[in-house]
Amino acid sequence: MTPSAADRPADLIISACTVLVHDDQEGIGFARHAAIVVRDGAVEAVTTTAEAAILPAAERIDASGQVALPGLINCHTHAPMVALRGLAEDLPTEEWFNDVVWPVESNLTATDVELGARLACAEMIRAGVTCFADHYFAMDAVARVVAESGLRALLGEAFFSSQGPEGRERSLEFALRHRGTADGRITTALAPHAPYTVDDTDLAATAELARTHGLPVHLHAAENRDQTETSLARRGVTPVEVLERTGILHTDLLLAHGTGIADSDLPLLERSHGRTAVASAPRGYLKFAWPDTTPVRALRDIGVDVGLATDGAASNNSLDVWESMALTSLVQKSAEGDPRWLTSRQALHHATLQSARAVGLGDSVGSIAPGRRADLVLVDLTGPHTQPVHDLAATLVHSARSADVRTTIVDGRILMRDRELLTIDVAAVLRELEERLPALVERGHGRRVQHYDT
């Protein structure tokens, strides 16, 4: 690259760092003494620090001692539920839903959702998350926060069949209204809650709407073994078979959790006509003492991408995808009885390219390469807990922490610099949220948004 390669200065050059790169076979590698040239929100080049030094730039970041990674992607969460963090602890799944979460969610207002989303976006920016897939209520408020915070998101308005046709119609209206907004950073999905709360008629109608409007579907399914066994006992089919016969499986589908996916489901997933991906959030499965985890190895064997996720902070207590990456590697080793699976490099692949594909953005984010959007984070590895570095991939997955993220960039815009948030006033959010919490957590009214009985 020479100074004449561009007609005007680059918007941003990040130099003196190590850059995580993907080769032609999607293997993970690292380019050392590297620099990233950013122009018009995209990566223009990954070059050497020496070559970048002679290029004109509007802004420069000296990233000495840091690693540049593609921004992490939270492939399934309920961002506003940070307002419920720690409210429903040490409970089985049924009691968690019926006794705490669904009664509290009947109190939700758009203001509560917006404040929760602001706090969540601040948490994710600080943890190196540049994109998240959200599935919740009052999603106009979440879209507003995404636009203002600078993050990227796949958003869907959740609905139950108990809401009548209006629930499904609101989900569609939201998806069409917000698709491509926030300068293209917002993509949208239809968001039926799950096969146990959305009937076959609504699922089939959703599949048809997805095909007609070119929208993906984001839902929970086969979340745990109990759900699969209950579905078999009551209906004679697994939750995945429900998705197949209603046509959902033949849309572009993001399926949350899937720890109850049965061996008999795998051929159905392999033959699905659309882009099928599964989002795995292992911390919540451990908290609920579910006996299984997402069958990552079996899914990868049939070509299904598995993205990393946190679920909502009411069950996971954090939105730390860094932790999900480490836990995925460890839990998969235990589940498979094989220390060679999942390796640190495989975990990084799930956290980057596979997560990007899971949310339908595999062509634009998930790697640092020319033409990709400049969604990236800088991670400081100079701390004692990350030294010495014998295996950089292992250091990133098992030693580094989300607090080591120094800078977060989306579309070439710096959202956090040297740990300072630039787009969200956390103190103001907390002041207002604190005033609203007593009304939000009240459960004496006897209402709930739904009933969990699987």
Image (tube, rainbow, N blue to C red):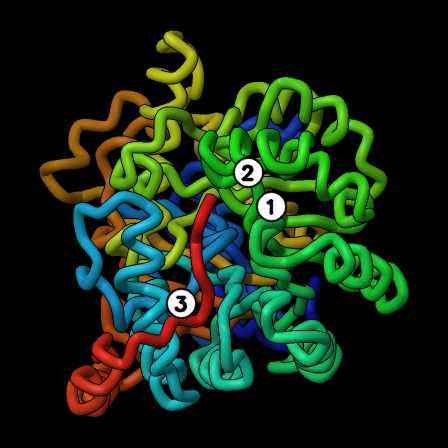
- At numbered mark 1, what does the secondary structure look like: helix, strand or loop? strand
Mark 1 touches mark 2? (CB < 8 Å):
yes
> Which amino acid type is shown beneath numbered disc 3?
Ala
When the figure is inspected, residue 110 is found, relative to residue 158, above or below; the finding is below
Query: In front: 334, or 64?
Result: 334
The structure residue drawn at horizontal position 29% and vertical position 54%, both measured from the top left corner, is 96
When the figure is inspected, residue 214 is found, relative to residue 49, above or below; the finding is below
- Label 1 or label 3, whichever comes before in sequence order: 3
The answer for how far apart the CA atoms under marks 1 and 3 are is 17 Å
Q: Is residue 356 left or right of residue 330?
A: right
The structure residue drawn at horizontal position 82% and vertical position 29%, both measured from the top left corner, is 271
The structure residue drawn at horizontal position 59% and vertical position 19%, both measured from the top left corner, is 298
Question: Residue 222 has which mark?
Answer: 2
Tell me if residue 352 can be seen: no
Q: Nearer the viewer, mark 3 or mark 2?
A: 2
Residue with the most extreme left position: 384
Q: Position of residue 113 (x, y in %)?
A: 39, 81
Mark 1 touches mark 3? (CB < 8 Å):
no
> Which amino acid type is shown beneath numbered disc 2?
Ala
- Label 1 or label 2, whichever comes before in sequence order: 2
How many neighbours does mark 3 have within 10 angstroms: few (below 14), some (14-19), or many (20 or more)?
many
Question: Residue 255 has which mark?
Answer: 1
Residue that numbered label 3 is attached to: 79
Q: Is residue 407 left or right of residue 173?
A: left
Query: In front: 95, or 378?
Result: 95
Q: Position of residue 80 (x, y in %)?
A: 37, 72
The structure residue drawn at horizontal position 46% and vertical position 54%, both measured from the top left corner, is 74
Tell me if residue 53 can be seen: yes
Q: Is residue 418 left or right of residue 371?
A: left
The answer for how far apart the CA atoms under marks 3 and 2 are is 22 Å
